């Protein structure tokens, strides 16, 4: 389902060339267990035992660039183990439905996941704190915050759901895709029925004068086509992948809410690994998360000419109007961070630092 038009946009992720082999001592002593790849990363020689399979569950559909890029990073980890471990993503909920994914990883029924963390705020309420109204100025600020957010998410996931969070990916910001007209002012939002993916987005829409209802993202096309909703909060890559430009033409960019996906692994599986394998996994997933995040930072800009060719119209909300919108909804974010105590304070400090680097600018 990956769209070939994006080949002119995306950067190819270079694979690592693995130089395998062991150095055997002349007197017959045991061989070293490490070698070095062409890129200088340490590898671990494959043991004689059976390969360890790490299954990665995700709700993302097959062909999504997110899966492609994540799998490439996981393949680099597998290469660094000389095949002792293999990570494989099973897309589209093949290993079980989305609501059960985090618990399946917690119990070890599934070894790992590539999952939208806020979707599991019922298990870990703090996971919803990064997807709050107007938390970040833009995708650049969200991307800058990800490494520090990952540290907090790893602490939380270890303490509460028996898994390690080894990579946090910012998948861009959610904005309004509407059917009838571009949403330029608060008057345009009055009485509008807007489909959202999570309660914080519904609160945002409500604060702006519309009516936010949670809808299954797999039904976005039909919901817009049939008029069940007037608009939807979406990022641009999902619009392109699912061809939503066929049923809605107007995209208002105001960087309302950011999205975060995490790469997690069951703690017992992680703890069963030797230190060198753990290091290889941590390094590769962290680097992969950053690489994917960097791609998504530019996606909203890169896809504009692509979606314009499909008949869509972008509208970049002016800073003054955005401040008016933010003034109505930001109390939701302030209250949530304050109620989260020490975790909320840490997140606010990270966010404030990132926003200071990347102010909101109308393109």
Image: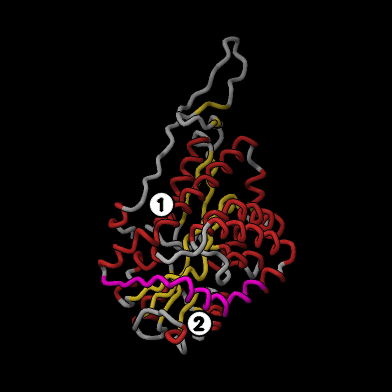
Residue furthest to the bottom? 191
- Quick one: SS at disc 1? helix
Q: Is residue 72 magenta?
A: no
Q: Nearer the viewer, residue 31 or 334?
A: 334
Q: Looking at the image, which residue is at 40% across and 55% down?
A: 65
Give the percent coordinates (x, y) of residue 228: 41, 85
Give the percent coordinates (x, y) of residue 174: 47, 69
Instruction: Please tell me whether residue 312 is drawn above or below residue 206 in the rendered image.
Output: above
Q: Nearer the viewer, residue 320 or 311?
A: 320
Q: Which of marks 2 and 1 is in front?
A: 2
Query: Separation of disc 2 and disc 1 at Cα?
Result: 31 Å
In magenta, the rendered stretch is: 311-334
Give the percent coordinates (x, y) of residue 87: 50, 46
Residue hosting label 2 = 213
The 10 Å Cα crowd at callout 2, few under 14, some 14 to 19, many 20 or more, is some
Instruction: Please tell me whether residue 83 is drawn above or below residue 10 in the rendered image.
Output: above
Looking at the rendered image, the quarter that the N terminus falls into is bottom left
Q: Which of 189 and 307 is in front in this view?
A: 189
Give the percent coordinates (x, y) of residue 21: 49, 24
Q: Are marks 2 and 1 in contact (CB under 8 Å)?
A: no
Q: Is residue 320 magenta?
A: yes
Mark 2 or mark 1: which comes first in sequence?
Answer: 1
Residue hosting label 1 = 68
């Amino acid at each position: 389902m990956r769209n070939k038009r994006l080949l002119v946009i995306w950067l190819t992720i270079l694979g690592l060339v693995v130089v395998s082999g062991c150095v055997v001592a002349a007197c017959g002593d045991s061989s070293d267990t490490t070698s070095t790849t062409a890129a200088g990363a340490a590898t671990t020689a494959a043991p004689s035992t059976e390969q360890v399979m790490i299954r990665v569950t995700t709700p993302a559909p097959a062909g999504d660039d997110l899966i492609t890029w994540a799998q490439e990073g996981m393949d680099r980890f597998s290469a660094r183990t000389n095949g002792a471990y293999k990570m494989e993503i099973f897309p589209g909920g093949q290993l079980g439905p989305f609501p059960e994914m985090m618990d399946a990883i917690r119990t070890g029924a599934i070894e790992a996941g590539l999952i939208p963390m806020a979707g599991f705020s019922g298990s870990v309420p703090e996971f919803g704190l990064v997807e709050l109204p107007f938390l970040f100025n833009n995708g650049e600020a969200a991307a800058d915050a990800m490494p520090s957010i990952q540290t907090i998410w790893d602490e939380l996931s270890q303490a509460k759901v028996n898994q390690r969070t080894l990579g946090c990916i910012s998948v861009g910001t959610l904005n309004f895709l509407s059917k009838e007209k571009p949403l330029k002012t608060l008057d345009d939002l009055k009485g509008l029925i807007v489909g959202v993916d999570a309660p914080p987005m519904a609160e945002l829409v409500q604060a702006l004068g519309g009516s936010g209802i949670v809808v299954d993202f797999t039904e976005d096309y039909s919901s817009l086509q049939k008029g069940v909703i007037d608009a939807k909060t979406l990022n641009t890559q999902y619009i392109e992948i699912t061809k939503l430009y066929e049923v809605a033409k107007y995209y208002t960019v105001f960087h309302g809410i950011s999205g975060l996906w995490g790469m997690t692994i069951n703690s017992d599986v992680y703890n069963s690994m030797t230190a060198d394998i753990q290091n290889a996994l941590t390094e590769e997933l962290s680097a992969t998360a950053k690489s994917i995040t960097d791609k998504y930072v530019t996606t909203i800009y890169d896809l504009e000419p692509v979606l314009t060719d499909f008949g869509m119209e972008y509208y970049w909300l002016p800073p003054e109007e955005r401040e008016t919108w933010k003034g109505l909804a930001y109390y939701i974010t302030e209250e949530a961070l304050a109620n989260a105590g020490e975790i909320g304070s840490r997140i606010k400090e990270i966010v404030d630092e990132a926003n200071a680097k990347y102010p909101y600018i109308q393109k």
